Amino acid sequence: MPLVARFRPPAGLTDLPEGSAFYDDWHRYLDSLQSDATRYGPGCVYDASRTNVTVLAERVMTWTAFPRDALLPDLRDNRREAYALADNRLRQSEYCEFLTERNAAGKITKVTFTCEVSEYWARLWNASPSTVVDLYRRLVSPAVTEAELTRNGVYNPNNRYNTTDGIAHLRRDDNSLFSAIHTAQRVQFYESADNYQAPITIPSAVDPRLHLDVSSLARKGLWVAVADPIGIYIVNWDDTGFTQPNGAPVGNYWTIQRGVPGMVLRLQYQVPEELGFVVGDLRIGGRPIEYGSQIAEHITVGIRAIVGVRQ
Amino acid sequence: MTCTPRPHRPPTFQSGPPSRSYLVCRRLRQDVAGFWSFVISAANALGIAPIKFASMLVRRWPSGAPLMRSPDEENLDLAGDEWANNHFIYDDPSRPSPLRPIEGYAGDNFPQAAADILGQVCPHFAHIRKMNPRDLATDLGKPADSLTRMVLRRGIPFGPPLVGKRLTGNQLTGLRTSAKLQDKSERGLMFVCYGASIEDQFEFLTRRWANSPVHPNYVGHDPLIGATEQQGHRTRYIDVPTSKGVRRLKLKQEWVTPTGGGYFFAPPISALTDVLGA
C-alpha cells in the first residue's frame, strides 16, 4: 500500500473544516503534478500516493531565500545594488517572495516572507471565496473586499493586495508548485559521472540544488518522492549577528503567521512597537538594514523529499 | 561656478581593488580534554567507538586519513599518502586518477571512496564536509559556487599535546580514567587563511555554514567551530547516523574559543615592487 492515502495541504493547513471537498481537490491536483513512477537510469522519481517504496531517509533540499541571480554574476562586488534589486518582488526567484514596508522616514518597519503557492489560494477560492477574503483581511488588510480579489469572476492572484498593496502568496508564474515539482522530477543529470560534470547554467540557487540532489540520488538507484505534506517551506532563519541600536543582540522579532516550525509558509520580521525602534534601526554584522533582502539572506527555504528503495 | 561638496557618506558595502589578498588570523583556544570527555560519553551512548565518533565530527581520523576512503578504521598508510588522502568526493564514488609515473610511488591503491549522498559515512555536519563541500550542491547552488567561498588555510598548533603526537585507541582507553581529562592547559590552534574577500569567504564560511544547522546541507551545526546565539540560547545539535537510525544529539559545550586575531591586508607583489620598492 502506498505511504500516502491523501496528500495534505501545505504544512497541514486546515483553512476549511474537515470533510470539505477542497481536500480531495487539493490531493487530485498534487497527484496530477507527479509521475506515478518514472525511471531515470537505475533510480526513479515517484508519487508517494501511487507507488509503494521502503523509505530509507528524509532529505531536505535547502537553499537561500535571497535571489541568487540578483547578486551573481554581475553584482558580486556591488552587494548594495544587488540588495536593492532583490527587493523587487518580480526578481524574487527562489520560491520565496517578500514585501518590505517602510515608515515615512523611509526606514524599514516590517518584512513579510511567503512561500505559499498561488495554486493553493486559487483552489481555496473555488471552494470558499469567503475563506480567502477572511485570510486576506487577517494577513494583509481589513479593507479587502471580495470584488477586489477577482478578475472576470475568478480569483486573481495578481490582485492589488498581493502586488502593490500587500503580500498574500507567491505571485511569479515560475514560483509555483507546478514548477517546483517539475524541476525536482525532471532528472537531467542521472547519466553524469558526478555533480562537477553536470552542465548547469541556470542562474538561480534552487534549480541546481534540486537538479543535482535528485540526479545524484537517482544515480545511486534510489527512489525519490516529494514528502507529504507537499509544500515549499521556510525551514529555518538565523538572526545571530543582528544587533539593536545599542549594540546588544536582537530579541525574537519573528512571527510565524502560516505554517508550523520547520514548515513555515508565512513569516514576518517586525520589532515590537514598545521597544521604540524599527527594523531599519537594526544592523547585521555591523551594517544597517536598508533592504528587506538583507534579511532574506538569512532565511532558508526548502523542499522535503523521501528517499528509498523499491520493495 | 562654485561647487558645494556633497556630504561624505562612507559606503555601506565596500568594494575593493581587484588585485589583493586578505589574511585572517585567529587564535583558537581548544578544550581538548573537554572534547574527549564529550566524545567518550556520547559515543558510548550512541554505540559508536569513540575514535570513530570523533572522526565523524571532524571527517578525518586522528592521523588525517579521510573517513570517505577508510570508513571503518584508522589507516596510517593512507594518511601518509598525500596523493590519496585528499582524493574523494561525497555524492558519487571517487575514481582512480591517472597519474604520470612518480619515482618511488606505487600508486594510489587504497580502496576508492563510495558514494555518501545521505551522509551515513561522513555526516553532513562533519567539520570539514561543511567547510569544503566539494562536489555537493549547497544552499548557494552548484559546486562551482562553493569554490568562490574557499580559502587557503593552515592551522598551527600551540600548547602541549594532551597525549602523544597521535591518539590511538589504546591511548583513548587509558584516557577515560586518566587525570589527563582534567588537564586544562592552554592549548589550541593558530588559524591562518588567505582569501580575496574576508566577508564573502572567511566570514561566510563561519557564519553561514559552520554556525548553521541547515547549511550547506541538512542537518547539524559544525560541532567543532560552529556557534549559535539565539536569544541567549547557545545549544547546538547534530543528527548522528547510527545503526539504529538517526539520533539527534544536543551539544551544550563549546570546545573552541577565539581568544584573539586580526584581519590583515596582503598587498599584491606589484604594490611591493612598484610602490613600496620604488
Image: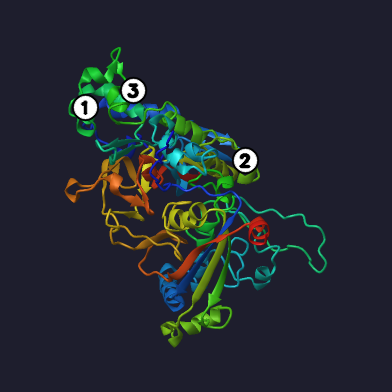
Q: CA distance from mark 3 to mark 2?
A: 36 Å
| Residue B74 visible, this orientation | yes
Q: Chain of mark 3?
A: A
Please say if B197 is above or below A112. below
Q: Residues within 10 Å of mark 3 (few under 14, many from 20)?
A: some
Amino acid beneath label 3: Asn
Camera-side residue: B30 or B24? B24
**Which of the labelled discs sits on residue A158, or is there none?**
3
**Amino acid type at image mark 2:** Ala
Q: Earlier in the sequence, mark 3 or mark 2?
A: 3
Q: Nearer the viewer, residue B110 or A159?
A: A159
Q: Which mark is residue A198?
A: 2
Hey, what amino acid is under mark 1? Thr
Instruction: Tell me the SS state at disc 1.
Output: helix
Disc 3 to disc 1, how far (Cα)?
18 Å
Q: Tell me where residue A183 appears, x and y as whole percent.
A: 50, 33
Which label sits in the foreground, 3 or 2? 3
The image shows residue A59, relative to residue A39, as above or below, that is below
Q: Earlier in the sequence, mark 2 or mark 1?
A: 1
For the residue pair B143 and A191, the one nearer the viewer reads as B143
Please tell me how crowded label 2 is: few (under 14), some (14-19), or many (20+) other residues with Cα within 10 Å: some
In the rendered image of this protein, does residue A95 appear above or below residue A25?
below
User: Does the residue at mark 3 contact the one at mark 1 (Cβ under 8 Å)?
Assistant: no
Q: Which residue is mark 1?
A: A131
